[in-house]
């Protein structure tokens, strides 16, 4: 039976609860945000103002120009748009300038094996259409070494010109911070552009986390904004190519009627996220106490958890493997105790396969027993103490069960 105890939410990496300021902004916008922002009449112009405010707020947040911010349906679409930009009308089989090329493509892409599925799956799709994809394995620590990235670039360049390198700023499962500045220098020295999936970094780390990137992906719901909206910000000399065909919205790069109501929430979240990195930095001691207490609880239950991810990490994430248990089963048991955590990327939930990120780092066995705990601005010391108490209770109960039950 599900416990009636209050839920302790420790899955801030999956999504963040909308902030009251965001909800208030959306409520205030509701009376005029219903109009089509592409319409030239008064209601349309008033609705369009919310679109432009979101564009300006995102540009300020990531440090680029509002004219070069394309609003998308979220981080996944932003990542797909970023990867597609390098393989368009200059590649074999392309159609009219600026249009997607549906035939065979040319060029090379360098991408790590620990990227979000919206990057790895897009890379696999490009490979099927002729793009040379060079995969970079991470170190066991979860870091993509700059020298490994350079070697992959040189390896790919021997086959085809490298058009793009894609590297996340913060890993979505381990919180390991990637060497983006070094990656940018390596890519640019070889004539390639760098795309940074900053979905887990924006609003949590300073802008240095994606310094040097040519393209930056953002998602509103990771910074306490609404779901269903995100952005791809690019440097002025980057020419994007659409992945969808249709109207002229977003300069033809993202056709489809925009949502001014979501844009109003995105703008409020982006403004608020400007000083959020300081709030997240203050969470590091609480995260460390949570991690130490979880390891001690595991030891008391007869199986000390193994931390996944070393070195520089985002201040709010801990990922632990629990020898002898399955991560998804622990998540389900903790859910019944009112503790919300995850065993991998929320975008991959429901799959039977262990985390590709942890498999690439440490192997499938370690990946299969992993659980991610991620705290946020509203997590308290009392939450951590109570969550660890419930974890210990779950471990004791599972340990007492007969084998195979």
Image (cartoon, rainbow, N blue to C red):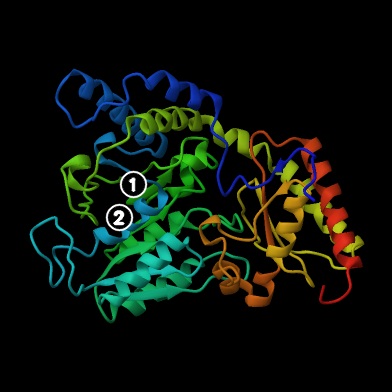
Q: Residue sitting at 89 percent across and 73 percent down?
A: 402
Compare residues 240 and 212 and report the one nearer the observer. 240
Quadrant location, the C terminus? bottom right
**Above or below, comparing residue 264 to residue 218 in the picture:** above
- Look at the numbered disc 1 and give the secondary structure of its residue: strand
> Foreground: 132 or 151?
132
- What is the crowding at mark 2: few (fewer than 14 residues within 10 Å), some, or many (at least 20)? many
Q: Residue furthest front?
A: 1
In three-dimensional space, the C-alpha distance between marks 2 and 1, rounded to whole angstroms, equals 8 Å
Left or right: 163, with 100 as reference point: right
Q: Residue at x 44, y 49 (%)?
A: 210
Residue 91 spot, x, y in % from top left = 16, 69
Above or below for 181 versus 36 = below
Asked if labels 1 and 2 touch by Cβ distance under 8 angstroms, the answer is yes
Give the x, y percent position of residue 64: 33, 39
Determine crowd level at label 1: few under 14, some 14-19, many 20+ residues with C-alpha closer than 10 A: many
Residue 153: where, in percent of width, then height?
36, 72
Question: Within the image, what quadrant is residue 301 found in?
Answer: bottom right
Q: Secondary structure at mark 2?
A: helix
Q: Residue under circle 2?
A: 81
Q: Which residue is mark 1?
A: 232
Compared across the picture, whether 337 is left or right of 13 comes to right
Question: Considering only vertical position in the picture, is 118 above or below 53?
Answer: below
Q: Considering only order in the chain, which callout, 1 or 2, is on the residue closer to the N terminus? A: 2
Residue 323 in view, yes or no: yes
């Amino acid at each position: 039976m599900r416990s009636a105890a209050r839920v302790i939410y420790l899955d801030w990496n999956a999504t963040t609860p909308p902030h009251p300021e965001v909800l208030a902004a959306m409520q205030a916008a509701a009376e005029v945000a219903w109009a089509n922002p592409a319409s030239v009449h008064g209601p349309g112009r008033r609705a369009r103002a919310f679109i432009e405010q979101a564009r300006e707020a995102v540009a300020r947040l990531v440090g680029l120009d509002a004219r070069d911010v394309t609003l998308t349906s979220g981080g996944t679409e932003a990542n797909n748009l970023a990867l597609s930009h390098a393989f368009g009308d200059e590649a074999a089989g392309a159609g009219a300038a600026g249009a997607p090329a549906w035939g065979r493509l040319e060029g090379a892409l360098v991408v790590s094996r620990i990227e979000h599925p919206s990057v790895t799956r897009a890379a696999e799709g490009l490979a099927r259409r002729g793009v040379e994809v060079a995969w970079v394995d991470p170190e066991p620590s979860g870091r993509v070494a700059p020298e490994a990235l350079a070697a992959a670039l040189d390896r790919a360049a021997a086959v085809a010109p490298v058009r793009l390198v894609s590297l996340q700023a913060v890993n979505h499962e381990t919180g390991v911070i990637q060497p983006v500045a070094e990656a940018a220098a390596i890519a640019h020295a070889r004539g390639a552009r760098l795309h940074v999936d900053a979905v887990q970094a924006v609003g949590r780390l300073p802008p240095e986390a994606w310094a040097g990137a040519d393209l930056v992906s953002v998602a509103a719901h990771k910074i306490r904004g609404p779901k269903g909206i995100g952005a791809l910000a690019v440097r002025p000399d980057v020419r994007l190519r659409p992945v969808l065909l249709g109207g002229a919205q977003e300069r033809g790069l993202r056709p489809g009627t925009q949502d001014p109501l979501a844009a109003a929430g995105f703008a409020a979240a982006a403004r608020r996220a400007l000083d959020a990195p300081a709030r997240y930095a203050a969470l590091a001691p609480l995260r460390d106490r949570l991690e130490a207490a979880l390891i001690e609880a595991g030891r008391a239950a007869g199986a000390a958890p193994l931390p996944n991810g070393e070195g520089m990490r985002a201040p709010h994430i801990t990922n632990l493997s629990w020898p002898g248990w399955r991560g998804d089963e622990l998540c389900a048991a903790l859910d019944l105790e009112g503790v919300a955590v995850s065993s991998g990327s929320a975008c991959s939930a429901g799959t039977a396969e262990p985390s590709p990120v942890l498999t690439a780092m440490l192997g499938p066995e370690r990946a299969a027993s992993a659980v991610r705990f991620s705290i946020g601005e509203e997590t308290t010391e009392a939450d951590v103490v109570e969550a660890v108490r419930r974890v210990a209770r779950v471990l004791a109960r599972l340990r007492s069960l007969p084998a195979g039950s």
